[in-house]
Amino acid sequence: MEDHKSGYVNIVGQPNVGKSTLLNALMQQKVSIVTSKPQTTRHRIITLFNDEDFQIVFSDSPGVMVTPHYGMQESMNRFAYSSFEDADIILFVTDIYEKYSGDEKLLQALETVSCPKYLIINKIDQDKTDIAPSLVEEWNSKIHFDRSFLISAEQNVSVDAVFTAIINDLPLSPPYFSKEDISDRSERFFASEIIRESIFKNYKQEVPYSTEVVVHAFKEDRESAQPLLKIYADIYVDRKSQKPILIGKNGQSIKKLGIAAREGLEKFFEIHVFLDLKVKIKENWRDDKQLLSHFGYDQ
Ligand SMILES: Nc1nc2c(ncn2[C@@H]2O[C@H](COP(=O)(O)OP(=O)(O)OP(=O)(O)O)[C@@H](O)[C@H]2O)c(=O)[nH]1
Ligand SMILES: [Mg+2]
């Protein structure tokens, strides 16, 4: 136990750069939802990589925003910035499309944090003009990073090098969590995230951003001949006009959503799933303190 290593490895960066994709690649399994839209991740999600000699406490976080518009986004930013407070190692993820950021608050947080920090330039699989090395230089001329990596989280390029560096830099410490655990989040949370991922993938414009998913019943049906997980979830929208959009003509859209979400849930929980989705309206929930707290956006 004296040689045991453990610590918080916190993934931070701007929206859509591939933070959650990197987390999944490091964990070697899907734990965080990924979509092509920015602001997919809304909470800090702790997941554990357990081994006999070490426990990595990974933390995924929302992408930091310069100007949050809703109470919900302010909370997301608070969650993101809290990642600087308990980090043993910071993974700052950016991609080949993002130039040195003008987000002073983010840069200052990166500069002042004293733990090892890695610069991770992602999506090099799309780097047709070989711009990545100059980006490493540019970022390092502004902030001192302890290590720099060019990776493709999606195609698993050099993710192993990041993992090896983490093990090397992880402090000596007993484990923070039970080695039986894989996350600090409940199965209901993961279920609601997987449903939300399908909403992000199936709807356009404002709809994904104005929805919240709450799983209110989650139970394994042991009576049925085949093991079956029953999940009942409410989808909250923040304007009346969005309910018919979610449901679609003759219920076509929500049916399509249900099929996609069920597939994602079955893959994650490795069991047949019955999914019941209801759409409810909570006007302006994204700015309603009480509802935000109810939906888990306070800290
Ligand atoms: N080509 C390419 N695309 C990637 C790579 N990594 C992530 N992506 C894509 O980039 C998009 C955003 O990925 P996410 O992992 O959701 O990004 P994120 O930083 O967690 O985003 P937020 O949660 O919104 O802050 C998705 O469409 C991913 O498929 C990569 O290495 N190469
Ligand atoms: Mg994310």
Image: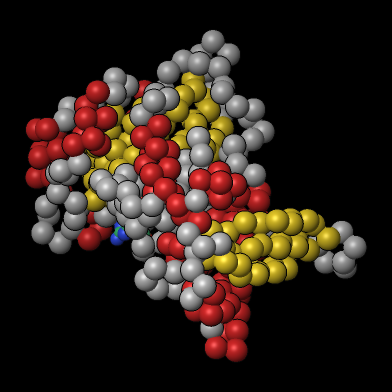
Tally of numbered tags: 0
Which residue extends farthest right?
Answer: 223
Q: Which quadrant contains ligand 1? A: bottom left
- Of 60 and 69, nearer the camera is 69
- Of 280 and 99, nearer the camera is 280
Give residue 229's quadrant in the image. bottom right
Residue 169 seen from this side: yes
Residue 182 location (% of width, % of height): 60, 38
Left or right of 185: which side holds 63? Answer: left
The residue sitting at 48% across, 76% down in the picture is 241
The residue sitting at 51% across, 39% down in the picture is 298
Give residue 13's quadrant in the image. top left
The residue sitting at 38% across, 52% down in the picture is 70
Residue 180 location (% of width, % of height): 67, 33
Residue 252 location (% of width, % of height): 57, 85
Left or right of 48: which side holds 232? Answer: right
Left or right of 236: which side holds 187? Answer: right
Residue 153 versus residue 162 in the image, above or below: below
Left or right of 135: which side holds 73? Answer: right
- Of 170 and 254, nearer the camera is 254
